[in-house]
Image: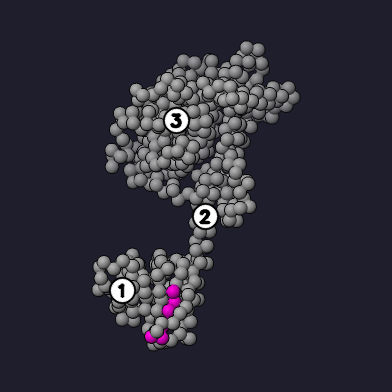
């Protein structure tokens, strides 16, 4: 199991690099260039986001940048989907802020370590497979809500500090500064749109950033720049054991946060894995991604990072720029580290407008525009789920939206199945009345099941045929027990027919109706069963 989950490290670099070529000798010069330039584009866009999320969590910007580097590097090497980008995210930052404000950043580092360990356990026990239970309407609502969240997050770049304010208050741009900002954003988007029609040598987002940054720097245009957020200059991350006491009290403090962060991180990562998989045509890797996220966060907690998870926006930038192998993710992480250690002065000169323009293009590409046109053609419940998940994503967070969407979809499914149960009635040659049940029998359909029968009007012998039905749970067993009792009280015989073997086991395990049957062990589907005598009859 460990080999399947963690993989051989050399194989992670050689055989599982996306396109079966990640870092292998067969990697062409063109592919190598595309992967490295895609990584550079992602790294440039990561800087302001990592800084912004660090501010949200209430920690130093370098705490966010180190997390983006370490989480991005480790998941790029051993993650479940080549092309995915991970780093510090807003979904986790909003949970961290309360812990940091109450107990300090050292408790955050300890929490991130525990979060990583929980995610590793989730991967070892293959809990990632449950992401397949997320319905398609939930996915549509998720990406739509995400696109809106990314868009709204960029609007903060259109704010400037209030002159003379000492509390960090900000106000919206107006007049000429706003016009310059909007013009640069529009120029970046136009370059991104035009570049693929001219050349595919350079990723379009990178072209947009380079051209606009060059114009701003060359002409000295007064526009907000990365350095206005905070200085990103720093050294290499160093090993650091979290300075939180190893006591039961500490565990009581950090465990609830660690569980929430682990769950949010895995949900967002696995949904990103599915989304990238749809674009790149890849499948699987959920458990491996859980382990990779866990290892990344455990290591990050020991190197002064705030932890993280997959970043859908950055992953979309990478994939749309041509990144398909692990090399692009590794390059993004290494470029980010180089920015911190060697090139902070240069990166701080990049105009925020260029990065905002890139993210607006991501918004346009992420939003599932088709979901609007199909609203009238899909079931009303599915349309409602898309809208609900979109709204909850914007109002709360991505993980909560997915949970709400899955619950609502499950309830809708249960209700639809509850209304499907019915029976076809007939009379056998021996005069017994036959109820041929159709539709599943479970907790939601037990009332409808009971209403199908008329014990007082039925003949002395009644057969219930489950050939087109299925007994699902304990509520169904109880419904059969209640029905049997009604017929028994009236002195009538009730037989169950065509129960599958798993239903036999359920009924036997319940200990209410069934006894060990002597029917043929090769019996494929069912046997007649007399609920009064507890004996199986002939096979059908």
**How far apart, in angstroms, are the residues tagged by discs 2 and 3?**
33 Å
Residue denoted by label 1: 539
In front of the other: label 3 or label 1? Answer: 1
Residue denoted by label 2: 409
Residue 457 x/y as whole percent: 48, 86
Residue 402 x/y as whole percent: 51, 47
User: Upstream in the sequence, badge 2 or badge 1?
Assistant: 2
**How far apart, in angstroms, are the residues tagged by discs 2 and 1?**
38 Å
Q: Nearer the viewer, residue 373 or 145?
A: 373
Please report the residue visible at 48 percent of the width from the left and 49 percent of the height from the top.
134
Residue 337 x/y as whole percent: 44, 21
Residue denoted by label 3: 324
- For the C terminus, the quadrant is bottom left
Assign a secondary structure to mark 2: helix
Assign a secondary structure to mark 3: loop
Residue, far top: 218
Q: Is residue 293 visible?
A: no
Please report the residue visible at 41 percent of the width from the left and 26 percent of the height from the top.
327
- Asked which colour scheme the image uses, the reply is one colour
- The relative height of residue 204 versus residue 521 in the rendered view (above or below) is above
Residue, far right: 175
Please report the residue visible at 50 percent of the width from the left and 76 percent of the height from the top.
451
State the mark number for residue 360: none
- Asked if disc 3 and disc 1 are in contact, CB closer than 8 Å, the reply is no
Give the magenta part as a residue range: 430-436
Q: Nearer the viewer, residue 289 or 31?
A: 31
**Which image quarter: residue 431?**
bottom left
Please report the residue visible at 60 percent of the width from the left and 18 percent of the height from the top.
211
């Amino acid at each position: 199991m460990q080999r399947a989950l963690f993989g051989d490290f050399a194989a992670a670099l050689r055989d599982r690099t996306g396109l079966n070529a990640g870092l292998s000798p067969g990697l062409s010069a063109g592919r190598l260039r595309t992967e490295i330039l895609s990584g550079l584009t992602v790294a440039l866009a990561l800087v302001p986001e990592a800084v912004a999320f660090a501010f949200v969590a209430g920690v130093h910007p370098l705490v966010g940048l180190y997390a983006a580097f370490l989480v991005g590097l480790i998941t790029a090497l051993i993650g479940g989907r080549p092309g995915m980008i991970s780093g510090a995210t807003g979904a986790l930052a909003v949970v961290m802020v309360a812990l940091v404000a109450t107990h300090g950043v050292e408790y955050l580092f300890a929490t991130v370590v525990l979060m990583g360990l929980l995610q590793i356990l989730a991967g070892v026990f293959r809990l990632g497979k449950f992401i397949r239970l997320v319905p398609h309407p939930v996915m549509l609502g998720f990406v739509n809500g995400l696109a809106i969240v990314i868009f709204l997050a960029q609007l903060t770049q259109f704010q400037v500090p209030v002159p003379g304010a000492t509390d960090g208050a900000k106000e919206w741009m107006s007049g000429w500064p706003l016009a310059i900002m909007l013009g640069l954003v529009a120029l970046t988007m136009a370059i991104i749109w035009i570049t693929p029609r001219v050349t595919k040598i350079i990723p379009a987002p990178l072209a947009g950033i380079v051209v606009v940054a060059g114009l701003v720097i060359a002409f000295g245009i007064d526009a907000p720049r990365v350095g206005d957020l905070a200085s990103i200059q720093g050294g290499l991350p160093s090993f650091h054991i979290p300075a939180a006491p190893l006591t039961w009290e500490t565990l009581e403090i950090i465990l609830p946060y660690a569980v929430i962060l682990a769950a949010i991180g895995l949900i967002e990562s696995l949904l990103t894995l599915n989304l990238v998989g749809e674009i790149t045509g890849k499948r699987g890797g959920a458990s491996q991604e859980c382990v990779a996220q866990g290892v990344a966060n455990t290591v990050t907690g020991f190197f002064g990072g705030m932890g993280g998870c997959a970043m859908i926006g950055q992953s979309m930038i990478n994939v749309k720029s041509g990144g398909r192998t692990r090399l692009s993710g590794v390059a993004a992480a290494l470029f980010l580290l180089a920015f911190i250690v060697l090139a902070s002065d240069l990166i701080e000169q990049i105009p925020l407008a260029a990065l905002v323009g890139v993210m607006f293009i991501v918004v346009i590409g992420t939003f599932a525009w088709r979901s609007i046109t199909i609203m009238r053609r899909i079931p009303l419940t599915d349309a409602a789920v898309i809208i609900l998940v979109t709204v909850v994503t914007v109002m709360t967070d991505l993980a909560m939206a997915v949970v709400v969407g899955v619950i609502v979809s499950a309830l809708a499914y249960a209700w639809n199945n509850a209304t499907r149960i019915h029976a076809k009635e007939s009379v056998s040659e021996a005069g017994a009345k036959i109820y041929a049940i159709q539709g599943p029998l479970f907790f939601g359909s037990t009332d409808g099941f009971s209403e199908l029968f008329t014990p007082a009007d039925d003949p002395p012998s009644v057969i219930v045929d489950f050939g087109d039905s299925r007994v699902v749970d304990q509520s169904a067993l109880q419904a059969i027990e209640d029905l049997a009792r009604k017929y028994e009280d009236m002195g009538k015989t009730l037989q169950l027919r065509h129960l599958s073997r798993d239903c036999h086991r359920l009924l036997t395990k319940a200990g209410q109706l069934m006894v060990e049957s002597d029917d043929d062990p090769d019996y494929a589907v069912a046997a007649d069963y007399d609920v009064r005598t507890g004996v199986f009859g002939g096979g059908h």
